Amino acid sequence: MSSQLMLLACFVSACSFAQTPQFTIQDLGALPNLPACNATGLSQAGNVTGYCAAGEAAGGIISDPATHGFLYSNGALTDLNLPAQSTPLPMAVNDTPVVAGAFFGINLYDFTGTASPFIEQDGSFITPGGKMQSVLPFALNNAGQLAGSSISLGSESINLFLNSAAVLYTVSTGTTTVLPAPSGQGAAAFGISSNGTVAGASISGNGNTFNPLLWQNNAFQTLPILSGYQQSLATSVNDSGVAAGLAFDLDFNEIGDPGAVSHAVLFNTNGTVTDLGLLEGTTNSMALGINNSGTVVGVSATAPIDFTLQLAAYLYPALNIYRAFVYSNGKMYDLSSSLTNGSGWTLSYATAINNAGQIAGTGIVQGPNGGEQHGFLLTPVAAPPVSTITSVAGAGLSVPGVTSISDNGLFTIFGTVLASATTGLSSGTVVNNQLPSILGGTCVEQGATKLGLFFVSPTQINALAANLPASGTVPVSVITNCGTANEVATPVANVQVAAAAPEFLYFVLNANGQDPVAAVQSLTGAYVGPSRLVPGATFTPAHAGDFITAYGVGWGPTTSTDPIGTLASTIASLTDKYTLTLGGVPVKVSYAGLSPDSAGLYQINFTVPSGLAAGNQPLVLTVDGIASPSQAYLTVD
């Protein structure tokens, strides 16, 4: 019967579950004699920049200022060989690749901070001057637009961006634009989209308050601050204008504020702000990157933030208080637990994400010499197709469809990834006259009951309903890898039930639902139907007085004592009241019930009445007041 089945658009309720993101990890390695590395920037094509340090367990500029900048491209890590190798901090890279950064330093003894920007491309090195002096570049797009902020650390406030200016620099022309800020305030730019939207913040004159901003066409827009927080900033923005960043409370008069708190946030285009939350067991978080799909990456930590804010992910070593995260499908995931090949890795910082979903950052990998701090590049693993039930129909596939199921009713499930392969019944799968409950590794559950199966494939299953109530709905789910530790269940489909759901089976299925009933001459077994109905087979119309057997499914309870799913050992009549008409004329029925030696198949034996006009006459079975589809027909002559 499986050859008769086709898709029927008859949807039932079902839920979908978000898939946990999965990634493969590429170790970026280290430069010679510089074993501890931090990855800071990522391009759309997967180029990564960052720096390496000599300290075995340091790898952060504040703790080990003797660093070398690197570029990872086409699978190779190379030293940028910058002219001065004291404290280079590469921060951004594009596909060309152009690398932008600064020679950077913080002296906490006299509260000074310095930045001298550089741009490197193919071994050429320039140091932009003018308005770019003291600017730390943060982000660079493929149009060569660079967003950055001047660094100014003073004794009156421990704020790296005290009196800062946000700048937009164009690499190809060397022009610098100072972005506007609210009156009396400074500004800092931290991110830029491919279409030139800049993300950042304004900073109060005393350096104690940040307010998040976006700039478009050199005009700023103030973003909302998450309720319950006093300050906020935007670290990155995508092409749709959705920005990511952090909301925080921090006393900039203290190097370490024990009461400081922060949460990663998403600034939506409708003027709202979303709290992205925390990884379990952490107390603070901050978002560092967002792509055009709205996926966010960043850091969740077990300690308060300090005066470096988001720069901690770029300046500090990979301490165990930091855990890299990805925020996807409305949930924050620990990236260390999302690796398919990440044995030995602990990921501390996720600093950037591109539109392909690749993520760059820094972590600790266990090697021959113990834990080594390296940059990484994650590449998303395509999520496996989701097993889902999309529709359920009576196995006759009538039009209009029969959408209810009943006791011993043969029905069809349609969906995605319902089985690993196509498998039908065979002599080895029917044991002790019982339909298999697992076929090709797939089973179907009606509540807690596994159903008998006729056929399974990735998109379609034929199953036999078990005992059912007379009304309401029942939960149905499909389970792949059934009976193993790796079994996966579809979301439940709540399927309507009825005392009977009668329909006939058909020799041919037509889109308009006008289908010839599967019927034979009871005595000879000859096919009944219009001549040449099916090429290669002989069909003849029925005549008045002919004794006919027609077949169907879903006709409801019978007098059988065999368990449902067992091949019928004998005839068993319908127990509910029924009638049959042909061409609107009541028909004399000699038997209506189970078809022997089968499961879930019904038959009705009747005599063709006289006086019918030649042609296709509707055949309608009504059981318990429920009629079969009226477009089914028997051809008479």
Image (tube, rainbow, N blue to C red):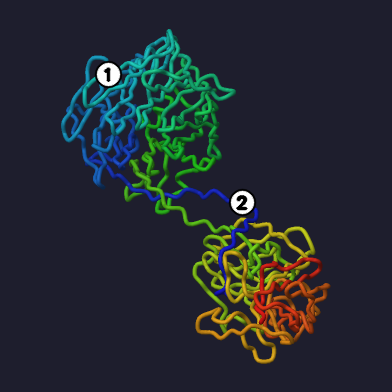
> Badge 2 local density, few (<14 within 10 Å), some, or many (20+)?
few
Task: Give the alpha-carbon distance from disc 2 to disc 1, as whole Å.
Answer: 52 Å
Q: Which type of secondary structure does the marked residue at label 2 adopt?
A: loop
Q: Which residue is mark 2?
A: 15
Mark 1, secondary structure of its residue: strand
Q: Amino acid at mark 1?
A: Thr
Query: Quick one: label 1, few (<14), some, or many (20+) residues within 10 Å?
Result: some
Locate residue 573, reporting x and y percent: 79, 80
At 69% across and 59% down in the image, what residue appears?
495
Q: Amino acid at mark 2?
A: Cys
Residue situated in front as seen by the camera: 313 or 555:
555
- Percent x, y of residue 485: 56, 64
> Where does residue 91 sit, x and y in percent of width and height?
31, 30
**Label of residue 224 in the image:** none
Q: Is residue 278 visible?
A: yes
Locate the C terminus by quadrant.
bottom right
Is 32 situated above or below 443? above
Q: Earlier along the polypeptide chain: callout 2 or callout 1?
A: 2
Residue 285 image position (x, y, % from top left): 50, 32
Please give the count of numbered marks on the rendered protein.
Answer: 2
The residue that mark 1 highlights is: 176
Q: Quadrant of residue 11?
A: bottom right
